[in-house]
Amino acid sequence: MNFQLIPERFQTANRVLMIRPLSFGYHSQAAQSNAFMNQPEGDDSKVSVEAQSEFDGLVRALRESGVEVLVYQDERGLPDCVFPNNWMSWHTPQDSEQVVITYPMCNELRRAERSSDVLDVLCSGVGGVGHLDLSGLEEDSEILEGTGSLVLDRVQGVAYGCVSPRTTESAVESWCDETGYSAFLFRASDRDGEPIYHTNVVMSVGSKLAVVCDESIADLEERENLIGMLQQNHRTVIRITMEQMRSFCGNILELVDQDSNTIFAMSSRAFAGFTAQQQQVMRQLGKIVHVPIPTIENVGGGSVRCMIAEVGRT
């Protein structure tokens, strides 16, 4: 069954899902394809407690800014469960019912994060919600990790994807066949020549702002085409360096509050990584909300955008 999602009603959400970790920690299998992860020194329980505190701080900051945050407590002790946007995404087409998509994951342990209980909580009281389950692509080693792998222009129907072990071309094609989106695939690498594991580390796309580390794209034609696409539709484009990408400046998320005012959610590390001029550009477009999450970033290899799964608007 195909779910034609485009055009979607909203680019940005005011309602999000976050999953509070029970036993956050270093996942050695995931680290094989994520160069942003670092094995911590010291006690594992301390790392988990620090991650929980950082998680709670982000939830509090988003709620104080007017974003509705649905929190689900993990009870299974999965080390990467704090990143729910990798296994599910929520969509609000203009002309049909809302749709939730579940995804094929690269690592076996992370596949356990897909939760029917979480989906039941999300869908309760919403009315009809379609479900597109693509997890079966794992059987053919085709991988697509949600809005980690795909950075979406929801209104224009463009799915940006950085090819990597966690974002295979065939899986992107299958996703686009099912949803009606058009794919814009490219290749991006770090300074060591290793593929960037997720697209949402390289770039962010909102209704007002796009951020991209075009320096990570070696192919000049791909780079120019990507910048050209992002500059369409009157978006402001901020181009960041490799060093800024390492500080998770590309891993930010544009949201809105209950009055549709723009919010840019990011970590304090990412905020400090932007230049004063870039910060000012963002302040002219909306409110910046940032919190420190060093444990989650250093050990988990993901930042604020990875921690948030958008769930449409109330």
Image (cartoon, helix red, strand yellow):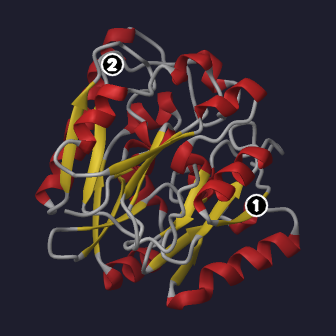
Q: Quadrant of the C terminus?
A: bottom left
Seen as rendered, the residue at the extreme front is 1
Q: Please state if 83 lies on the left or on the right of 292 as rendered.
A: right
Tell me the residue at 76%/61% (across/down): 185
| Three-letter amino acid code at the position of disc 1 | Leu
The residue wearing badge 2 is 48
Tell me the residue at 54%/89% (across/down): 233
Picture quadrant of residue 166: top right
Picture quadrant of residue 143: top right
The residue wearing badge 1 is 185
Seen as rendered, the residue at the extreme bottom is 234
**Callout in the foreground (1, 2):** 1
| Three-letter amino acid code at the position of disc 2 | Ser
Q: Secondary structure at mark 1?
A: strand
Q: CA distance from mark 1 to mark 2?
A: 36 Å
The vertical placement of 42 against 298, above or below, is above
Residue 137 screen position, x and y as percent: 69, 33
Q: Please state if 22 lies on the left or on the right of 11 as rendered.
A: left
Residue 23 screen position, x and y as percent: 34, 15
Residue 91 screen position, x and y as percent: 42, 58
Q: Nearer the viewer, residue 127 or 85?
A: 127
Tell me the residue at 21%/37% (across/down): 71
Residue 228 screen position, x and y as percent: 70, 84
Q: Please state if 183 lies on the left or on the right of 286 as rendered.
A: right
The vertical placement of 304 against 153, above or below, is above
